[in-house]
């Protein structure tokens, strides 16, 4: 059974930082990419960042220069360091693994295994 668990969300003032974590267990693929998505109230889920098995990364334009995706393979843990947070970053953040280990696309339709998410709220 695959288990995806996000953590690290919270309430933070604009300009502040948070680090999200995501652990994956039971995933049956040795090589896979991992991504962060987010969904604000009343909006569709959107891709934030993706990291391939070789460490290559891709970011949505709206987080470039502020967010950093990384992973610890030994711990099967994915991270999202979020700096210079803005109120518009308020959303529920999800992580997802995917066996298309070569793709840098941030299309949620390509991901089928999701965690329950962690809430991030940024106030001004």
Image (cartoon, rainbow, N blue to C red):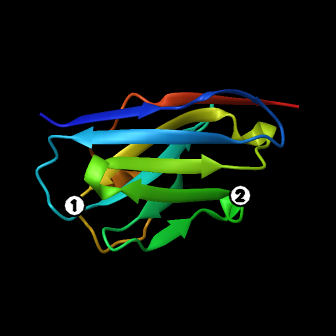
Is the C terminus in the top left, top right, bottom left or bottom right quadrant?
Answer: top right
Nearest the viewer among 40 and 102 is 102
Q: Residues within 10 Å of mark 1 (few under 14, many from 20)?
A: some
Give coordinates of residue 99: x percent, y percent: 22, 60
* Residue at x-position 59% and y-position 59%: 68
* Residue at x-position 79% and y-position 43%: 86
Give coordinates of residue 28: x percent, y percent: 11, 50
Q: Secondary structure at mark 1?
A: loop
> What residue does disc 2 label?
66
Give coordinates of residue 58: x percent, y percent: 51, 69
> What residue does disc 1 label?
99
Residue 45 in view here = no
Q: Quadrant of residue 14?
A: top right
Q: Secondary structure at mark 2?
A: loop
Nearest the viewer among 100 and 82 is 82
Q: Estimate the spatial distance between the alpha carbons at disc 2 and disc 1, rounded to whole Å.
A: 27 Å
Q: Is residue 62 above or below residue 95?
A: below
Q: Quadrant of residue 22?
A: top left
* Residue at x-position 35% and y-position 72%: 103
């Amino acid at each position: 059974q695959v288990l995806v668990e996000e953590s690290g969300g919270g309430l933070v003032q604009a300009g502040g930082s948070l680090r999200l974590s995501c652990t994956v267990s039971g995933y049956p693929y040795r090589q896979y990419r991992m991504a962060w998505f987010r969904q604000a109230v009343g909006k569709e889920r959107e891709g934030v960042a993706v990291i391939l098995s070789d460490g290559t990364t891709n970011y949505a334009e709206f987080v470039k220069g502020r967010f950093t995706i990384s992973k610890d393979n030994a711990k099967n843990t994915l991270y999202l360091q979020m700096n210079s947070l803005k109120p518009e970053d308020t959303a529920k953040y999800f992580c997802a693994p995917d066996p298309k280990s070569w793709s840098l696309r941030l299309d949620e339709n390509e991901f089928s295994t999701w965690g329950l998410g962690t809430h991030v709220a940024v106030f001004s």
